[in-house]
Amino acid sequence: MRESHRKMVNHVMAIASIFLLIVFFIPSHGNNSRSMMAGKSVATVYDGEKISIGEDNELKEEWDIVRHHLYKKGVKDNQEIPFARFLGQENVLAIDNNPKSFELLVLEAQHLGVGVSNDLLQDALHNGVANMPDETDDNYEQYLQAVRDLLSVKNLLDRVGDMVKISSPRALRALAMTEQDESINIVEFPVSHFASAATTQPSEQDIEIQYDRYCQTLPGQTVAGSSNAVVSPLGFGYLLPNRVKVQYIGFTHAAIIDAIKNAPPPTGNQFDVWDSLAERAYREHWKDFVPDAVSPPDWSALAPAITDKVYASLYESYAGDLNRKVYDRITEQVAADWQAYHDAVSKGQPAPASSQGVPFDSNDYLRLFAASIQHDFGVTPVLGIEDQLMGPAELNRLPDIGAASDGAGHSFGQIATVAGDQFQSAATLPDSEKLSMWQPSPPIFSGTAQDPTGIFIFRLSAMDPSHTAKLEDVRNQVIQDIRTQAAWDAAVAQADNILTAAKNGSGLIDAAEHHQPPLEVSTTDFFNAAEVMAGKATMPTVHLSAASIAQLASAARDLLSTPAAEGRPVSEVELPADHEVAVIELQNTRADWMDQSELTMRQSIISAQAQAELAERMEAAWAVFDSVSKRVNYQELTKQD
């Protein structure tokens, strides 16, 4: 389906490029005050039209203005959403990959006569833009031009999206692939069943060939990240990732609640006990716990499940204060100790004693710090002193902190192995985001930053930049990988034979029965492939990883549109995540609509959805730098030019 979308986008874009060149020369009415600015030229567009340094800088600043300084008005919950989102999220992402795309899109809109009406501009200024400076402000004209140019780019992309038309047969096909349930027959070929094909000891030459092929590839990498990386679907790789030794401390919300439960109520009254406070809370807020009751049931008559809720609510009411105290102690004290240590070391002076009485750069520092948290607050902290070098995947498997991330969604393992200042990856980061040895990280969270189940900080005690492992260190893994590949090839060959037999014979069940020895065929219950792919449903009776189930569902969905000359559609699916190959066959389908009128209605809805999705893809493809730079013939000028 994704491939068909890509082909459709390319086809429509080819037509649109011709059509737009004709239509866009009919100018839109509106004002655009930009003129070619004086100064040295840095690039040319179209037939040598020059872009000056001034214009180049101004357009760069405009994207920054609409992306970071202007916000959309009337957003729910007072969220600050960049005004650039007016273009649509996919278009913003396309431009963010290379912000020069915005500059070229503005110039393209000007060249093709796509302007902005004064009514549209005024409506945006009064009803759409927040944080716009006053007209007396020195920056007003620049901000006004930024809004005008964003709207002109929006008009340009809208006209691109308007070219999309979804045919009725295509909509019906999409309906059949998304709104039908199906069941499939499956024959599985696990690599483990073909171990006999991989018992021969590889030659030294075979070992060296395998090692050389994947020595620039990270283990588990299945998508090429660089021109040097040769990838295998089975994840072979002998390039060690950035690795670190980490030390971390933090606490979980569960530990906060446990500390509250195991201590006297922090009410200031020595006679208060949890039981009496819980009963009082129930009497005052009984509707919260028994909403269907006409009058409050007696406390002693409540079911245990309800009294548990009362106690839980009571403990939660005190959790915030304790949470803040522990959070402040961890973040502020470690930061202060780090600053004192860093200031001294950077000046070549002896490091001062830390708050824990031991050197800040010792393993004992966090151990003693954790003990002080336990002593002062009764909270059992999460503590880790890891003496082994770990890559991102290993870090993300650590208990508690392994599930943590920052506010931008970067995982703990990703942050720790990117931000270290000894890693090449940190070269592009601002200094404020880099981590020196022993420097405490900003807080990271499990759950969400708004409702965290855990809060942690970490520091790096060693950094090992990415490098290729020596052959002698990974020889056993290389040999195992060669054998795995041989078993995989045998599984694929067996699946190929069954697929051919199923296509040329009476179907998959018959082909499996006539194979020697006979092969087991499993049949699923009905499922909706689109919902399984979206993670909203499971595939009945299939016990594979989520990645493999999504691949199976995608292949099963494709069977719905696969013509079969005779019998049922059948296909082969490689499932490297589970080291397995499968052959699947469409067993049965079940329509999800009642009659022809409902079918027509759903077809109309699907058509509109597909048209909107394809228009969004096409607009984003139009906004990508490589695409727009070719259309406007963008050429950077050298010093000689």
Image (cartoon, rainbow, N blue to C red):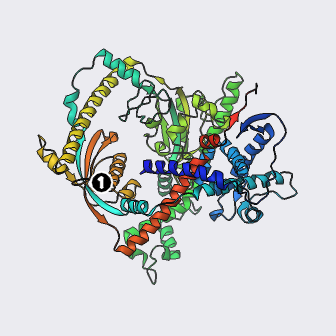
Q: Is residue 310 left or right of residue 22?
A: left
Task: Give percent across and percent down for residue 377.
Answer: 55, 49
Q: Quarter of the image containing the C terminus?
A: top right
Nearer to the camera, 396 or 627: 627
Residue at the right extreme, as displayed: 136
Residue 456 coordinates in the image, percent (x, y): 54, 44
- Which residue, given by chain and number where applicable, does mark 1 sit on? 563
Residue in the picture at 83% in, 53% down = 141
**Residue 367 appearing in the image:** no
> Does residue 206 lie above or below 26 as drawn?
above
Q: Where 631 sits versus 436, above or below?
A: below
Q: Would you say 102 lies left or right of 618 here?
A: right
Nearer to the camera, 628 or 287 = 628
Q: Residue furthest front?
A: 22
Task: Determine whether, in the image, residue 430 is placed left or right of residue 292.
Answer: right
- Tell me which residue sits at (37%, 63%) in the image: 179
Give the vertical position of 9 relative to 485 (above or below): below
* Residue type, mark 1 in image: Pro
Q: For residue 127, what is the image quadrant?
A: bottom right
Image side of residue 372 versus residue 168, left or right: right
Residue 338 in view of the camera: yes
Q: Quadrant of residue 298?
A: bottom left
- From the top left corner, tell me how far across and down residue 171 is, in percent: 43, 62
Dot 1 alpha-carbon crowd within 10 angstroms: few under 14, some 14 to 19, many 20 or more: few
Residue 540, image x, y percentages: 28, 56
Q: Identify the secondary structure beneath mark 1.
A: loop
